[in-house]
Image (cartoon, rainbow, N blue to C red):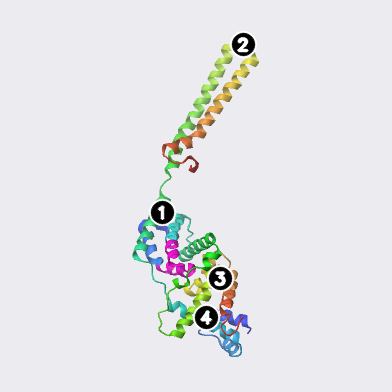
Amino acid sequence: MNCRDTQRSLESDHERPSSADLEHLSRCAECTAHRALLRELYAEVHASVPAPPTPALLSRTEERARSALRRANAPSPLRREILLPLGIALFALPIALAQGWLWLSGLFLLGEAWLPSPFLTGISFFYIATVGLTLGALYASLPFAVAYANRVQPETS
Amino acid sequence: MKRVAEGDGEALAALVERHSARVHAYLTRYTRSREDADDLLQETWIRVARSARRFDPAHRFRTWLYGIATNLGRDLFRRRGTRERALLDINAQPEPSTSNEASIAERREVRDRIAGLPDRMREVVLLRYFEGMNEAEMAAALGIARGTVKSRLHTALGRLREGYGVTG
């Protein structure tokens, strides 16, 4: 048996070494020192036990942990309040698109006889771009509006 | 732990009561400061509460708990840097309850040697000999392979042995 095996074996159980370990220990000072160290370690374990946490510390710990648990399990108010307006806003999207389609259809129907086609196309493009940008800005501002209403910093949303 | 994950504060309180004394002792030895151990104990349980849903029931709660405590200890050391740690009061460790002066001196020496080990080595020594964990539990707690635990422990013991008559 070599030193490495003996020391590993002692690390598993230094009190009851095998006969092979004992034989090795009888002629190896290094492994004997290793065993002595392990004994010291276990003696230290039994000799010194740090003072337990005070009741005040335990009480504070428990209180803070409970509070953290409540927060972890509470539904996020921000998420809840964003989802509802977002749902309503998405519901309004097809209505806005339908209205835009009606406007443009009406414009072409009435204006085709009076105005040149490129002019009508330009007006249509301008209208679509404006509506698109407005809707985009509206949706993008939603989380910030909710955060502001909740007195929460927008960047945390 | 399942009840804690579901938000049961009473179940969490029971865990705090059952495990805090040992975790606190571990943190006191690990940080060598009772004040730090007090703070880290609270932080450990806060993190348990926050992460309860992510706890994998396939693992033992105790190893998970010590893993959290160890990580918080490492974070603390990282924030402070090595220099300040070296100045920590080693006397924060408890005095042995024995009256034998030679024995006290030996224990003190062992304690000082453990305190002087690099963090990663001190962790395995404390978990193995003071917390009674086996290699598999230590590997799970520290998030490292069993082979790494073995070699780290062996190296740590080698360092502790230096000065015990024969150096390895």
Gap in Å between the C-alphas at discs 1 and 4?
41 Å
- Mark number for residue B121? 3
Element assignment for label 1: helix
Which mark is first along the chain, 2 or 1?
1
Residue at numbered disc 2: A115
- Mark number for residue A68? 1
Q: Which amino acid does label 1 sit on?
A: Ala
Label 2 Cα neighbours within 10 Å, binned few <14 / some 14-19 / many ≥20: few
Query: Quick check: do tags 1 and 2 share a chain?
Result: yes
Disc 3 + disc 2, Cβ < 8 Å: no
- Mark number for residue A38? 4
Q: Is residue B164 magenta?
A: no
Q: Which amino acid does label 3 sit on?
A: Met
Label 4 Cα neighbours within 10 Å, binned few <14 / some 14-19 / many ≥20: many
Query: Quick check: do tags 3 and 2 share a chain?
Result: no
Asked whether B71 or A2 is in front, the reply is: B71
Which mark is first along the chain, 4 or 2?
4
Q: What residue type is labelled 4?
A: Leu
Gap in Å between the C-alphas at discs 3 and 2?
85 Å
Q: Locate the C terminus of chain B and report the quarter of the image it occupies.
A: bottom right
Element assignment for label 4: helix
Which mark is first along the chain, 4 or 1?
4
Secondary structure mainly formed by the magenta segment:
helix
Element assignment for label 2: loop
Tell me where residue A48 appears, x and y as whole percent.
43, 76
- Span highlighted in magenta in the image: B21-41
- Mark number for residue B124? none
Tell me where residue A127 appears, x and y as whole percent.
57, 21
Visible residue check, residue A67: yes
